[in-house]
Image (cartoon, helix red, strand yellow):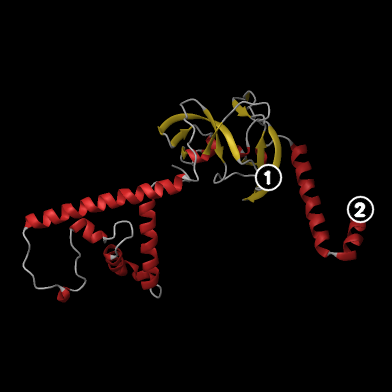
Amino acid sequence: SGFHPETNGQTERYNQELGKGLRCLAEQTPATWSRSLPWVEYAHNSLPVSSTGISSFYCCLGYQPPLFPEEEKEVEVPSAKALISRARSTWRRTRVTLLRHVSAMKSQADRHRRPAPRYRVGQKVWLSAKDIPMQVSCKKLSPRFIGPYPIVRVITPSAIQLRLPPPLRRIHPVFHVSRLKPYLVSRFSPPVRTPPPLRLIEGGPVYTVRRLLDVRRRGRGRQFLVDWEGYGPEECSWVPERHIVDPPLIQEFLRGIRYRLVIRQVASLGGGYCHVSLSTFAC
């Protein structure tokens, strides 16, 4: 699910350990990291782990492969029956040990968790805005949750698929329940913006601009960051200047930017110089 990389934690930890070993061996010549990868992998699989007490090689093969052929003892080759028996015994012990450690880790992790609500298809939920790329003027004062969005599918009790608006189409629509919060109707909850009825002019849709947030240069023209009337902050978008048919709104926004720039430049002078510049500007 999106923004919740905890499902395959064992692989993530394995990749981290491989990265540490490769940084040590290929620090001087990073382009040759592929030559060092087999040795790092061999060392990792030969190292006994705390959860089972044995190495990955011994768990999978039933024996520990020697690092150097000359260190192998002169012994007779055991029969296939004895090898299978030893391997099955090792797997049984490993499984019991792993289950015991998994149970202990689950109990430790659940101490700081609480059961997630049971969601159903069609229910509306709030989505955490922690990792959602939103175009807002002030990140600290932006909403903690956005939406609400309807549930399209309950994949598992902990993985929920939402119907996201078009501006969020690049985000994977499946989220962990820790990123969601049920939408409850209450007189204390903030009002939800409802999009106004769609208007058509000359066959094309027309939307109402609530306010302008920012401006940037693109090629020979300018683009404005628009906060749309009836839509949340996650749906703010950059619009070319020629598409905004409200010249007074653009002029007022640009005057506000110029005023803020002047105040910032005056304040940077500091001391009594600031008072002289302010009076001069007022004149």
Q: What element carries label 2?
A: helix
Q: Quadrant of the N terminus?
A: top left
Q: Which residue is drawn at 49% across and 25% down?
A: 122
The one nearer the camera, 237 or 239, is 237
Real-space Cα distance between discs 1 and 2? 32 Å
> Crowding near pointer 2: few (<14 within 10 Å), some, many (20+)?
few
134 relative to 25 in the view: left or right: right
Q: Say whether disc 1 or disc 2 marks the residue closer to the N-terminus.
A: 1
Q: Where is residue 139 in the image (x, y as percent from the top left)?
A: 65, 48
Tag 1: residue type?
A: Leu
Residue located 39% across and 51% down the image: 9
Determine the residue positioned at 71% across, 38% down.
211
Tell which of 187 and 263 is nearer to you.
187
Seen at 21% across and 56% down, the residue is 60
Residue labelled with disc 2: 282
Residues at marks 1 and 2 touching, judged by CB atoms closer than 8 Å: no
Placement of 132 over or under 153, stated as above or below: below
With respect to residue 195, does 262 lie above or below? below
Q: What element carries label 1?
A: loop
Q: Quadrant of residue 64?
A: bottom left
In front here: 213 or 150?
Answer: 150
Residue placed under numbered mark 1 in the picture: 141
